[in-house]
Amino acid sequence: MQELDRLTAKYGLAVTDTAPKATEPAAPKAHNVANGTQGIAALLETVHATLAKFAEASTTTRARAGAEAYIRAKGRPALLDELYEALKAGGVEFMSERPKNTLSAILGQTDTLESLGRERGWWLKGQPEPIMRRF
């Protein structure tokens, strides 16, 4: 729970209760932080579920799969620091002196992700970047 609180504070996210009330029928959940319907806990659950499928795979495979799952669930680009923290929380360990540089190199070699630059983060290759509205 402390890790959740730390990540929530670090990235300015809010954890919301998406469980339906007893009197409400269950509705499909949208997977998009941009519109506030999915919090960091759900994003981390997505990463954990994906990483569980690749439990016996290499760190490279786990990092690629986990990062892609996180970005898809988030619905917008994710910064390298954010991806690193989510993967680390999911149990991916990078055995290097500069683990974030290692992650960046791994992601840079994928066919499914592309860097939009340090300030904008990583996104799905070939997909239009979502428009972020500020109110």
Image (cartoon, rainbow, N blue to C red):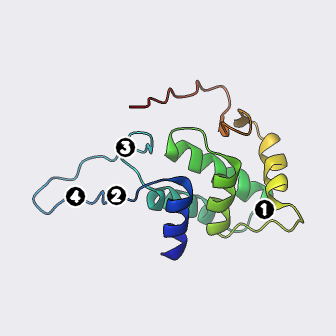
Task: Tell me where residue 89 sits by quadrant.
Answer: bottom right
Q: Which mark is first along the chain, 4 or 3?
A: 4
How far apart are labels 2 and 4 at the CA level?
A: 12 Å
As drawn, the residue found furthest toward the right would be 97
Q: Nearer the viewer, residue 112 or 9?
A: 9
Label 1 neighbour load within 10 Å: few <14, some 14-19, many 20+: some
Q: Amino acid at mark 1?
A: Thr
Residue with the mark numbered 1: 59
Q: Residues within 10 Å of mark 2 (few under 14, many from 20)?
A: few
| Residue labelled with disc 3 | 30
Three-letter code, disc 2: Thr
Q: Position of residue 78 (x, y in %)?
A: 61, 44
Q: Amino acid at mark 3?
A: Ala
Residue 20 — which label?
Answer: 4
Seen in the picture, residue 112 relative to 27 is either above or below; the reply is above
Residue at mark 2: 16
- x 84%, y 55%: residue: 102
